[in-house]
Amino acid sequence: MEKRNVRNDSSQMKDLLQFDDQDDGNKNSSHEKQQGSNNSSTQASCSSSAGPRSAAGVCRTDDHEAASMQWTENASSCCQLDRLKRLPQCDTKLEPLTFSKSHTVLIDVGVFRCGAGPIPQDGRDLWHKNFVKMPCSPQSTAFSTKLDLKVVHVKGSVQRWKLISKQLTALASKKTASVDEVAEAILTYNPKYKGQWSFDGLSRFVKFVPKAENYFETLFPKIAALALKLPDQVKKAIPLLQRGQAAAITLSQVQISCLLANAFFCTFPHRNTSSPDAEYHSYPTINFTRLFADWSERKKEKLRAIMHYFNVVSDEKTKLTGLVTFERCFLRDTDMPNWRNCKETLQKLHLTSQGSIETEGTGMLQVDFACSLIGGGVLDSGLVQEEILFLMNPELIVSRLFTEKLADNECLIITGSQKFSCYSGYSDRFEWAGPYEDDLERDKWDRLKRQILAIDALHFKHRREQYRMARITRELNKAYCGFKHYHGHHGPDIATGKWGCGAFKGDPQLKAVIQLMAAAKAKRGLAFFTFGDEELKRGLEQIYHLLVTEKTTVGKLYEVLEDYCAVLQEARGTHVDLFEFIRGTIRPSRSLL
């Protein structure tokens, strides 16, 4: 293919870069005047990226031109939040729950359709590379020097579940159990890790949490009893959601609670190492060992959320009646858009610096700013958007049991998870803020009308790495993979925000434009939360208004990004504001002298 020439807008931007280099004195004084101004219209036209500027952000518009442009810059094409579609408006075409080659249902569908609730589906255990290797599988064995004839499986080994159940039964029979007793039980059936696994974090957690909230020693036996129910609750092999395969798994909330109780007691075999030669090296960790080690304030708050979940689901008064579906989706090569030729224009946008994806975005497709290994550091020290989401909705953690690392053309969609907790703060300021009563409606499959989309952005070692079209195209495809409608359904609109920014070093302006383009291609509206970033909100609102007013297509915007990357390559380290560049390209007469 012949290389496309960079258009005049790139040369115009280079002229601006040259102007900046020649006019440092004027630039500085102008910047100081701008910072000291209290005039809101001047701020709108100059500070908020309204009119002609240099690449360094210096307003070059005279007062008359600024006044003439005020209407354009203060106008908005954004919509109110209630104009966007939510799940209650979108699931009327949901077909009856069925089992298929690509959808494994772990409850009895026939009984469920009769209204009897989620009863475990009979089946058989499969000790196979394509399925979860279960702790209660007869094939799960452990070497023992003291053979018990009742638990012998093969010469020199015992059925591991017999060892596990013996330890957990002893714990479950107690009214209270200490951390030392929990640790002793875990290490009995994981003897290889004696001297390696630490329970310092769990021990100090129980000691330091105030007495009014410290119910944990009475909770440990209840978690053990819940873990022991696994063979009765999960009777059918759980397939792995593997790379390159579109597949779904539906479990009951009770089944999930049993699986997570086993994760708490570290019973899952072959899941205690992530070395390159390990069987599950391309899967996230699931056993809770790392969460129990190395005390920190972060882990204290994380454990408060996790313990609250177990306190609720182990209560005999709690009736968990719902289902949760985990679906891995991927884009085939034939599904990849030719972004340069896309004729779609931008969809609805609600833009706010207040609120959150999980609260104001309830009922929408809520974006999880995911790690490619789903859940990120939720079972370790990580505590940003994805980890917080998984702590408030702990049923999401079970996805780590069977979801292989996401490829560039894949996503995970989770429907029906329950929110159990509230929180405040972020990262080191995160705090568990108490119980949450989830009163969402349920769909025809008894799933809560909450849908979470896990898409992983690229992690850049250096910020400049993201300004290459191969990287931008990857992010477009990843977002589109998540935003795309599947199974012929028209799903809800999308709640998102600064995806891939922060620790992943993404440019918030670029990531916002990418998501707008992917949503336009998928024909879905966006609710975009800037999390208090007023500058991003103002800039995005103005750029969106310009793009909508000019009926700019996704293809045109892709070409603008190509030119932007080319300019940055020639700018030799000088950063060019993306929103200014878009404005100078779409309406050059409004942005250049």
Image (cartoon, helix red, strand yellow):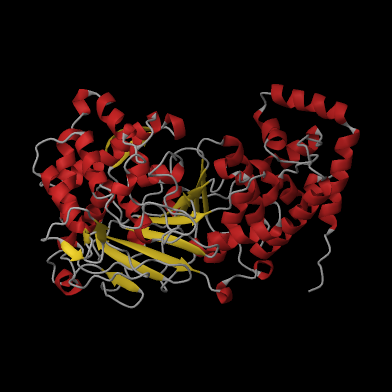
Locate residue 162 relative to residue 133 in the image: left or right: left
Locate residue 246 relative to residue 229 in the image: left or right: right
Q: Quadrant of the C terminus?
A: top right
Image quadrant assignment for residue 229: bottom left
Locate residue 474 relative to residue 229 in the image: left or right: right
The percent coordinates of residue 235 (x first, y second) are 19, 67
Number of numbered discs on residues: 0
The percent coordinates of residue 19 (x first, y second) are 88, 39
The percent coordinates of residue 42 (x first, y second) are 70, 31
Q: Residue at x 43, y 38 (%)?
A: 381
Image quadrant assignment for residue 66: top right
Answer whether residue 416 is visible to the viewer in this image: yes
Q: Nearer the viewer, residue 424 or 199?
A: 199
Residue positioned most to the right: 22
Image quadrant assignment for residue 69: top right
Q: Residue at x 37, y 59 (%)?
A: 414
Q: Is residue 46 above or below residue 255?
A: above
Q: Nearer the viewer, residue 422 or 165?
A: 165
Q: Is residue 158 above or below residue 201?
A: below
Q: Nearer the viewer, residue 413 or 344?
A: 413
Q: Quadrant of the N terminus?
A: bottom right
Answer whether residue 320 is visible to the viewer in this image: no
The percent coordinates of residue 439 (x first, y second) are 24, 48
Q: Residue at x 40, y 61 (%)?
A: 403
